[in-house]
Amino acid sequence: MKELSYLNKYFYKYRWHVLPGILFVIISNYFGILPAQVIREAFDLVQENIDMYRLYDGFERQSVIYSVFGSSLLFFGVVVLVLALIRGIFLFLMRQTLILTSRRIEYDIKNEIYEHYQALDFSFYRRNNTGDLMNRVTEDVNQVRNYLGPAIMYAINTIVLSIMIIYAMYSVNATLATYSLLPIPILAAVILVVNKVINQRSTRIQAKLSKLSSFVQETFSGIRVVKTYTKEKEKLDMFAAESNEYKDRMLDLVRVQAYFFPLIILLIGLSTIITVYVGGLELSKGNITAGNIAEFIIYVNQLTFPAMSLAWVTSLIQRAAASQKRINEFLHTESDIPDGTVDEKLKGRIKIENLSYTYETTGIQALRNIDLDIAPGTTVALIGRTGSGKTTLANMLLRMFDTDEGRILYDEYDIRDLQTTSLRSQIGFVPQQVFLFSDTIARNIAFGLDTQDDDRIEQAARDAAVYDNIVRFEEGFETYIGERGVTLSGGQKQRLSIARALVKDPQILIFDDCLSAVDTKTEEEILHNLSRIMEGKTTIFIAHRISTIKNADLIVVMDKGEIVERGTHESLLQQQGEYANLYEMQLLETAE
Ligand SMILES: Nc1ncnc2c1ncn2[C@@H]1O[C@H](COP(=O)(O)OP(=O)(O)OP(=O)(O)O)[C@@H](O)[C@H]1O
């Protein structure tokens, strides 16, 4: 419950929706119990009129009494209808205020979580899997909304209705009220217990369903591998086994539900019998009228709803509290990267001083004592075996994570003093693994821009040597890519990713092995275009192929997290070291 208090700020924000909502609950309930009293009057009227009708047996007046009786009954019928109508209007208003507010708060919470997600750093995303992150924004928020809307609405409803009915019952006859209410606590207790069982089974079903969907998702994502290795049958058997378990758990739940409703009807029936029996006794003593018995039967039946919703509301609140706890855990997670304040236009000098970095999760030291001074407007290439720390260095330059060992300076500013948004907006980064959104090509390229500028998008596509490919599509730049659109080749994706970095026209460019999937001719074309773009900009080129980087102003060779050689292409070849070896190997590969 403590966890749910986090939501109070939203209740306060929407207080002018919540307060009238509560008022509407009270009013609608008042009109909900009035019909019982009207029916009592009608019942008593029937009895009186029958007596009167008998009295005038044989007299002419008898038919007059009959018609007066008929019109009075009609009147009561109309009153009940009108009351139901008024109640309906207030029920509508109650939902319009309380349920709508819960939807508004749901929207606010989703935005709050989403905004917080975006502020968190890389290590957070490494610790938590995507499914879990998604669940908090969707499933957990949904549970919380059930508390904000239905749970609160029905809780108020239950309390108000119970108080009103019990008050009405006791003001008529205390003895009858006590006897009629006897089975209600038993009913509530039974419902509570059964509900607990239902909840446990529902949770197990949810867990199974989660597993089942992950299984299906993974199989379909990797369908090519499954088919190539002809593992369809095996996967099908695994799916059937999982589904079967899901079905068994579902049947378990249905069994409990099957007992549940007849049991409630039985207990309500018991209450009705007690009411009629004790009511009859009270009637014979002259304490109540026959109409009162009818009134009580209606009350008892009306009380079923609060008894049922009591258990339902309790479980909604419990689930919401568990979900809010998970949400709070995330909302209270602080980014490991405290933001800086400097927002300056960078000239492009990058100085790395004695930088080391060890991944906490694996204990692998990815960078060791890196020293590098990159003059503004120059091109530096990083080359080295796989796992030598190149990507880690690129990520550190983007301040995806921090380290205590050594530092990075942009111009004269320590990277920690710079505003991360300002820094990143001045860097055009092409990651090793391309990620494109399921959207149009134009919007994918324009991702880093505030507005979609067609001329700039086309120019960026030309520079990345992907323009001709795009215009060949029927819808050109408006072609959808991704799940529902066209599938691009690996090389086309890489070039789109390059265009995305170029469109921003940033002062600093970092390319992380982004030409691995393009052929040598396209590579040359891109490099030729880039040489014009890179003029005056600081560029860091990470590559495996020497052909990609041989023109760089400075080539840095990395091995096991360290810089082992540095120089220009020529000077490095003269050194006859690691770089020269790599060059020879690659020459041999191309000759073969
Ligand atoms: N997120 C991570 N968590 C733990 N260890 C990591 C992580 N990313 C990389 N490493 C480790 O850090 C070392 C350097 O990896 P990095 O990706 O920087 O190498 P690289 O030179 O870019 O390799 P490649 O050329 O194959 O891309 C590797 O040993 C790798 O296993």
Image (cartoon, rainbow, N blue to C red):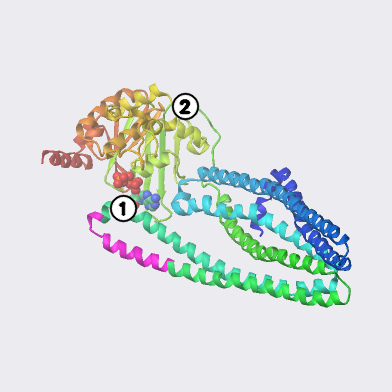
Question: Magenta region's main secondary structure?
Answer: helix
Q: Is residue 413 left or right of residue 170?
A: left
Q: Is residue 473 left or right of residue 371?
A: left
* The residue carrying mark 2 has its beta carbon less than 8 Å from ligand 1: no
Number of numbered labels in the structure image? 2
Q: Earlier in the sequence, mark 2 or mark 1?
A: 1
Residue 502 makes an appearance in the image: yes
User: What percent of the width, then of the height, locates residue 409?
Assistant: 45, 35
User: What percent of the width, then of the height, locates residue 534?
Assistant: 34, 26
* The residue carrying mark 1 has its beta carbon less than 8 Å from ligand 1: no
431 or 257, which lies in front?
257
Q: Amino acid at mark 2?
A: Thr
Label 1 crowd bin: few (<14), some (14–19), many (20+), radius 10 Å: few
Instruction: Identify the mark at residue 222; answer none if there is no mark.
Output: 1
On screen, residue 523 above or below 145: above
Instruction: Identify the mark at residue 239; answer none if there is no mark.
Output: none
Looking at the image, do the residues carrying marks 2 and 1 touch, with CB atoms under 8 Å apart? Answer: no
Residue 388 makes an appearance in the image: no
In the image, what residue occupies the spot 75% across and 47% down? 19
User: Is residue 272 magenta-colored?
Assistant: no
In the image, what residue occupies the spot 77% across and 58% down? 35
User: What percent of the width, then of the height, locates residue 407?
Assistant: 45, 40
In the image, what residue occupies the spot 41% across and 57% down? 213
List the residue tagged with mark 2.
451
Write the start and end of the magenta stretch as one range.
227-246
Q: CA distance from mark 2 to mark 1?
A: 36 Å
Label 2 crowd bin: few (<14), some (14–19), many (20+), radius 10 Å: few
Q: Quadrant of residue 446?
A: top left
Quadrant where the N terminus is found in the figure? bottom right
Q: Amino acid at mark 1?
A: Gly
